Amino acid sequence: MSGTRGGGGGGVRLDRPLETKLGLVMTLSDDDRARLRSLSETELRFRRGAALLSEGAEQDAVYVLKAGWVGCARHLSDGRRQITRFALPGDVVGFDALVQHVSTQDASALSDVTVVVLRPAELIDLAASAPHLGMALLWATAKDESALAERLASIGRRFALERLAHLFVETRLRLEALGLAEEDRLHFPVTKEQLADAMGLTTIHIYRTLRRLTESGLVRLDGAWLEILDLEALKRLGKFDDLYIVPGRIPEASRRAVRRAKD
Amino acid sequence: MSGTRGGGGGGVRLDRPLETKLGLVMTLSDDDRARLRSLSETELRFRRGAALLSEGAEQDAVYVLKAGWVGCARHLSDGRRQITRFALPGDVVGFDALVQHVSTQDASALSDVTVVVLRPAELIDLAASAPHLGMALLWATAKDESALAERLASIGRRFALERLAHLFVETRLRLEALGLAEEDRLHFPVTKEQLADAMGLTTIHIYRTLRRLTESGLVRLDGAWLEILDLEALKRLGKFDDLYIVPGRIPEASRRAVRRAKD
DNA sequence: CGGAGAATTGACGCTTTTCAAATACAGTGG
DNA sequence: CCACTGTATTTGAAAAGCGTCAATTCTCCG
């Protein structure tokens, strides 16, 4: 029944992840792009299952995902785990640790992963020399927080079936915005156990719920590949609200204000 | 049984909320403080129950809380509600909407509230003319996101009893960091219904759980006032991990780098 | 004094978990 | 090629946690 597992990366890859990410929030000039390209090119690869960050461990860099999926998680002292986020290409991982240089979360590679390493000093220079890019980063972070809040609403107030539906729709739209989703088939390298930890459910209940979704003909999950068979029905079922994921951008007026202030 | 309700503000108030907030993340120079004071002084007051922001409504300002409690929430289409955050003095409310000028959340006053209004243009000017303050804002936002992730872990993986314990400890520590908590008595103007919506539970289950906590002698909740009778026991019960709320600060080295880059 | 919202409690039912076990599948070594 | 082993997948029955329904008391406020 199961096809390809984890590995590979299967088509989710961005060459200039930070440009893509900030480009979703703000129109980038050629200068901006050049400035972003002047950042370090240090690339790291992690195999599926490898840890990018460990809760409590020292951390002195931030990663920007180029390819693959990363899961960020927190642990309770008795082993219970909550995956707080699935990071996709373009996403920044480990941002909060810049404050305290100690990671507050685990991050591990769900598929084979390629990242770009960003050092704090580089980020600081970037924000100082190109404040509007710093603002773009701030806004991108604020959008991430907004998505996180929606996930909170999912886990706090949606039933298992709705939660899964919502996650699938969200994932589909995120990958689509990056240009990384084929028509209705997308890379989804998440084991059932990870899915359970992300949805605040047990593995067993994930199986049961997934089967209900499958039998309704809404999705098909085959190994690391997810087929969305009826997006509209999924949206309805998951009570999906487009509001928080709409590709909101910094209006041009604000952008000009930044340029003025810079002089 | 119940004492004072909502209103009043009962001692939770900051005169320079943004200074206090950023001061938790970075050591502020006299210049920094002066720069922050040059921001607008427009003050708004909301009575308990009033709406600061409405989901889907246009939004062109950000609020910084001076006094009182604000609850930020999201709604599902059928009326279910999830409170994503209790904002306390110093907290910034409505930040994410700066990107799209449409609020993705409701914010309403849980007690009588005083806020300072920040206009986007001011923020942009601030970040452009004093990049390290922009960075401080970015870091403060990242810390908020970290706290949000911990709440996600609460709702996804903690039992009702643990959830409440964790919330009480978190609140106590947050107010303490602001210098707004008396020894073991703190302002907690949250109705049981709001508490339920914040914890992903029903009102009735909040009562049940609260009663268990009270009968164990760990806390006493009387109207809008919460007494913490055994903080250590609460921490243990709530599996509270100090990691994510530790007063992490931007190290001086980074700070100097910002100053250099600015020249 | 009457009405509205908040606080509180009891009984019952549904969702999800826990415990237990069986089947399928991939890689390993003989 | 085939047992052997570990992991993923699937199913069932029972229990627990939490939700729903219903009713009552209390408090504030007009």
Image (cartoon, coloured by chain):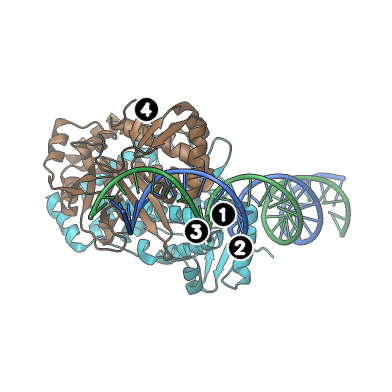
Chain colours: A cyan, B brown, C blue, D green
Give the residue type that dot 2 points to.
Leu
**Mark 1 vs mark 4, CA separation in Å:** 40 Å
Residue B53 in view = yes
Q: Is residue B70 above or below residue A21?
A: above
Residue placed most toward the observer, B148 or A13? B148
Q: Is residue B230 above or below residue A20?
A: above
Give the residue type that dot 4 points to.
Asp
Image check: A111 left or right of B245?
Answer: right
Residue visible at 13% across and 44% down in the picture: B39
Disc sitting over residue A158 in the figure: 3
Query: Quarter-wise, where is residue B135 in the image?
Result: top left
Disc sitting over residue A195 in the figure: 1
Instruction: Name the chain letter of the residue that bears numbered label 4.
Output: B
Residue placed most toward the observer, B23 or D7? B23
Disc sitting over residue B184 in the figure: 4
In percent of width and height, residue A148 lies at 41, 52
Residue A63 in view = no
**Where's the N terminus of chain A, which quadrant?**
bottom right
Give the residue type that dot 3 points to.
Arg
**Mark 1 vs mark 3, CA separation in Å:** 15 Å
Estimate how packed mark 1 is, as few (under 14), some (14 to 19) or many (20 or more) residues with alpha carbons within 10 Å.
many
Estimate how packed mark 2 is, as few (under 14), some (14 to 19) or many (20 or more) residues with alpha carbons within 10 Å.
many
Q: Secondary structure at mark 3?
A: loop
